[in-house]
Amino acid sequence: MKIGALSAKTGLSIQAIRFYERKTLLSKPERTQSNYRSYSDEALQQLMFIKQCRALDMTIEEISLVLEARANPENSCQDINETIDKHIENIEHRVDELKVLQKKLVSIRSNCASDTKIKECGVLHKLDSIVEVQSASKSNS
Amino acid sequence: MKIGALSAKTGLSIQAIRFYERKTLLSKPERTQSNYRSYSDEALQQLMFIKQCRALDMTIEEISLVLEARANPENSCQDINETIDKHIENIEHRVDELKVLQKKLVSIRSNCASDTKIKECGVLHKLDSIVEVQSASKSNS
DNA sequence: TGTAAACTCTATACTAAGTATAGGGTCAAG
DNA sequence: CTTGACCCTATACTTAGTATAGAGTTTACA
């Protein structure tokens, strides 16, 4: 199977497949005499696994860890579970951050109707007023 | 005020300040005869405004729009409000995505205890099993 | 058999929002 | 006069790919 067929089957772009190879997530395939990549079904499975992990927003590095662990069936799967746990925590953290942001933004947005002039815009005033300069003597006021 | 002082007052790195200048968020400052940047308090205010916007996770481009709008006090502030509204929507969307992800991850994670071997790891099995290959007969040939 | 389309190859540049470094120049104090 | 603290520009690096150039290869069809 050449890279185009693999791309069609996985739904990943050809460039993405070559990118995963460069990142050593996907092992280097055989080459035809004309230097075309030639893939087995194993590569297909591997790529689908990678795709699944990416869909879960895992980074290349996280996927690397999982793949490495997966290569040793007798080892403990603790590392994998740690990776997943950490990843879940990261996402939780990001959600919390974004919620705080959203609240701030909605609060700021509430200061202006849509038909106001710039110089009277409550949103801009709010954005300006939050500004505080760090000085040597003064902290927060 | 030289760039080091400005960096200390704003809490932004020197490189970030130069970066904002390159991105034309911050107008080019005067230069001393030795080619050092020399800033006014206006630049300080501008930078704090930018910092505030970045803290709200607005992109450089969004901030550009807001700054441009802000430069014309008589104009309507509709553009600014639209920018903020769109930004709020983006964040909402991202939060929703992340929540879905988190659920999936927690569900996957629930398939394995920590002291299992790789070959019996429910997490790995789950990751593998979701995989589905696009076949030629279903989509295009 | 010729050729044009479709496919593949490598290498490079680009994205966002900076950070980090190299290799210089400038300034104040001791 | 030299040391250290600044400052300058230019470049490379980060993530997870995407997009392109310029080349070579294979396939379809007349």
Image: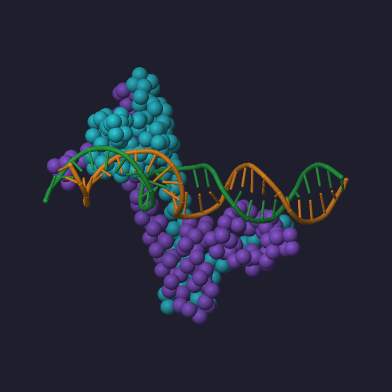
Chain colours: A cyan, B purple, C orange, D green
- The residue that appears at 38% across and 20% down in the rendered structure is A75
Judged left or right of residue B22, residue B62 is left
Provide residue B34's location: percent of width, then percent of height. Answer: 74, 60
Quadrant showing the N terminus of chain A: top left
Taking depth in this image into account, of B59 and A41 the one nearest to the observer is A41
Q: Is residue D29 above or below residue A37?
A: below
- The residue that appears at 43% across and 66% down in the rendered structure is B83
Provide residue B101's location: percent of width, then percent of height. Answer: 34, 44
Q: Residue lying at the far top in this picture: please name it.
A: A74
Provide residue B111's location: percent of width, then percent of height. Answer: 31, 31
Q: Is residue B9 visible?
A: no
- The residue that appears at 29% across and 31% down in the rendered structure is A33
- The residue that appears at 54% across and 61% down in the rendered structure is B23
Rendering quarter of residue A64: top left
Judged left or right of residue C2, residue B47 is right
Q: Is residue B20 above or below residue B134?
A: below
Provide residue A117's location: percent of width, then percent of height. Answer: 48, 78
Q: Is residue C5 above or below residue A24?
A: below
Q: Residue lying at the far bottom in this picture: please name it.
A: B74
Q: Is residue B67 visible?
A: yes
Rendering quarter of residue B107: top left
